[in-house]
Amino acid sequence: MPPAEDRFLYPDERAAGLTAGELAARFDHYITTCRRLQESRGPGLKILVGFETETYTGSFEFARKLIDKYAPDYIVGSVHHVADLNFDFDKDHYQKAVQALGGIDTLYRRYFDHQYEMITCLRPRVVGHFDLVRVFDPGYSERLRRPDIAEKIDRNLASIKNLGLLLDLNTRALSKDAKEPYPSRAILEKALDMKIPVVPGDDSHGVATVGKHIGRGIRLLEEMGFDTRWDNVINR
Ligand SMILES: [Zn+2]
C-alpha cells in the first residue's frame, strides 16, 4: 500500500523524490492494471488482486479506506515498523530500531504485539512474513524460543487459526542470503500441528523476480506434510 503520509516513505522512495501522493497515484494505476488483466485473462489462469498493508500510526485507518475504495480480492497483513520505526530496510535501520526500543528482545516482543493488533483489526486473508523481525538477527532461532517471545508467537498463531486466516511462506528471504524462508521451521511446525494453511509467496517487488524460489518453497511445504492443494483455501 502507499504510505499513509510522507513520514512513512521508505528511504529508496524518498531518494527517488517520491511523495505519498505520487505513490497513491501509482497504487491506483496498479489496481486498475490488475483489474484489466483479470478481465482479459485466458482460460485456466486465475488472478486475484491484492495488496500488502502496513502497521504504524494511522495505517489501519488508511488501509480501510483503500479497502473501501478498491475492494481488493484479498490483502496481506504485514509489519515492517515497530513503534513507527522501520526495521527491515537495511541493517542500519534494524540497529536504530533496536537501540530506540532498548534491546533486541523488546523489538521482538513489540513486533509480535503489533502483529496481533494488525491481525485482529484488519483480519487479512494472508499474514505476511510472520517472523520478519528476525531479518538481521543471526541469533534468531534461540530468541524465537524464549518463553516471553514464544508465548506471543503462540497467541498470534492461535488468532490466525481462530479467524481462519492463511500464513504466507515468504521465499523472498532466500534472495537475501537467508537460510530459510519466513516463517522459520519451528513456527511452520507449530502451524502444521495447528492445521493453519500455508500459501507460498514470492513477495516480488517487480516483474524480474516473479516466482523466484517459489519451487523451493513448495517443495519445503510438501516435505513437511502441508496440504498444497490451495484451490481449497483460496476459493473459500
Ligand atoms: Zn513485506
Image (cartoon, grey):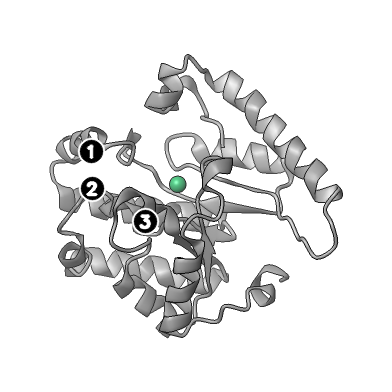
Q: Earlier in the sequence, mark 3 or mark 2?
A: 2
Q: CA distance from mark 3 to mark 1?
A: 17 Å
Instruction: Give the residue at mark 1.
Output: 91
| Horizontal side of residue 230 vs 113, given as left or right | right
Q: Earlier in the sequence, mark 3 or mark 1?
A: 1
Which amino acid lies under the numbered mark 3 shown in the image of this protein? Leu
Q: Where in the figure is residue 203, as x and y percent of width and height?
A: 50, 50
Q: Nearer the viewer, mark 3 or mark 1?
A: 3
Instruction: Give the residue at mark 2.
Output: 136
Q: CA distance from mark 3 to mark 2?
A: 13 Å
Instruction: Give the residue at mark 3.
Output: 174
Which amino acid lies under the numbered mark 2 shown in the image of this protein? Phe
Q: Residue at x 51, y 30 (%)?
A: 3
Cβ–Cβ under 8 Å for marks 2 and 1: yes
Q: Where in the figure is residue 195, as x and y percent of width and height?
A: 49, 82
Q: Where in the figure is residue 142, as x and y percent of width and height?
A: 15, 66
Which amino acid lies under the numbered mark 1 shown in the image of this protein? Lys
Q: Quadrant of residue 131?
A: bottom left
